[in-house]
Amino acid sequence: MDRIHITGGAPLNGTIPISGAKNAALPLMIASLMTGETLELINVPRLADITSLLRILGNHGVDQMVVGKRPGQSTEAGQTIRLTASNVIDTTAPYELVSTMRAGFWVVAPLLARFGEAKVSLPGGCAIGTRPVDLLIMALEKLGAEIEIDAGYVVAKTKNGLRGAEIDFPKVTVGGTHVALMAASLAHGTTVIDNAAREPEVVDLAECLIRMGARIEGAGTSRIVIEGVARLHGARHEVLPDRIETGTYAMAVAMTGGDIVLENTRADLLSSALDVLATTGAEITQVKGGIRVRRNGGGIHPADITTDPFPGFPTDLQAQFMALMTLAKGQSNIRETIFENRFMHVQELARLGAKIRLDGDLAIVEGVDRLKGAPVMATDLRASVSLVIAGLAAEGETQISRVYHLDRGFESLEAKLARCGADIRRVRS
Ligand code: EPU
């Protein structure tokens, strides 16, 4: 298994291009199942999760064309993918494919809405919590689906098509909102989604569906109204920048010191995280087409955060922020409210010398003067990148194993960091 070796201590200086958002690209690719015409997606990141979803879509019979790189294009330029679901041959998404990636479950919505049936494996358990799909099922039932759970599969049917309904989520759910948006877009009549997720990725999906002919209002607010249409058509859509990748590199430079321009991204996608970062001593300015993050000298100030649905502090940046706080001058409190078990990075950060105490959903981080490199293990996608950040700031060598977690969500991580002066390399074995 591959490992990443980092020798810490170098500041980061230079430019990092930000890729398209994984968590926007996945539902956008799934939306291709909603029409027989071609959906062209631009700025799709090159990631293992994208490949896994292409496999799921391929199994349904979706034609796929990945457009080749043009001469002169940098290796990090996002890819263009054309998906055409004109000949769907199978409405079953099997366990072997869905168990590798939770978002694969969301195919249930377009399959059910367009073909009146879907049989989709329940997604596998995930390391960061139990992550049930009860709210996704509730939304589809409200829209008139008949749903049974049979031998680990969700079997969904509708006799005369889905019907518009009022869906009031008792808890904000990104996946639930994606599923409700897709299903309601092809239902008869009007659907109102209350307590909808307001994440930028939900807005991106809604904008793409609108380009495909859907009638959606209010995406980005907690009340979305959808007027169902009989069919959707092809479209061309550019995936929005990855706010989690943006925040991750911003935290890396806040920790190592240096001066980085994050290109092809937008500060408004992660204002809450950037605001907190500014209070820790990083200097953040908006520049044309991106964000500049600097920390030259001066210590890292402690700050308290609580993860919350958008526009709050994102749970997907909690581990990275904790890495930063391990070197703060004082104590910081980090509360995780979205997932009940998203602190697996704590014991790995402790191997580098971090002082962190857990009390339920609260992590109390006592800043130390220095971290020291050590062998550590990546446990999930965002936790593993927190170890990279800590390794970049630690003295000596950090070796990270199980890096396949990183490959699920960070495109060209070593190359992007190495170009900015980091001593980081992948050792293949
Ligand atoms: N929940 C339920 N029942 C449901 C659905 C969700 O109880 O039917 C709970 C979850 O267990 C969790 C909370 O609701 O406690 C929020 O979950 P949500 O549905 O919003 O999460 P998700 O859609 O499964 C997406 C991202 C995650 C990100 C969360 C929260 C994708 C592919 N995944 O997951 O990203 O953490 O929203 O923002 O978009 C990652 O990229 O590393 C990642 C885990």
Image (cartoon, rainbow, N blue to C red):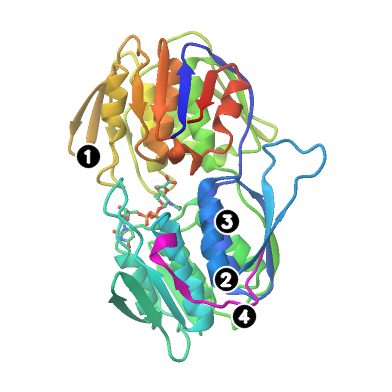
Indicate whether 247 appears above or below 145. Answer: above
Disc 2 or 4, which lies upstream in sequence? 2
Front position in the image: 428 or 319 = 428
| In this rendering, the label closer to the viewer, 2 or 3 | 2
> CB of residue at label 2: within 8 Å of ligand 1?
no
> CB of residue at label 4: within 8 Å of ligand 1?
no
Stretch in magenta:
83-97
Q: Which residue lies under the disc numbered 2? A: 33
Q: Which residue lies under the disc numbered 3? A: 204
Amino acid type at mark 2? Leu
Do the residues bearing badges 2 and 1 touch, measured as CB atoms within 8 Å? no
Q: Which residue lies under the disc numbered 4? A: 231
* Mark 2 crowdedness (10 Å alpha carbons): few <14, some 14-19, many ≥20: many
Do the residues bearing badges 3 and 4 touch, measured as CB atoms within 8 Å? no
Direction from residue 282 to residue 102 in the image, left or right: left
Disc 2 or 3, which lies upstream in sequence? 2
* Mark 4 crowdedness (10 Å alpha carbons): few <14, some 14-19, many ≥20: some
The CA span between labels 3 and 4 is 20 Å
User: x and y percent of residue 364 in the render?
Assistant: 23, 27
Asked if the magenta segment contains residue 401, the reply would be no
At mark 2, the secondary structure is: helix
Disc 2 or 1, which lies upstream in sequence? 2
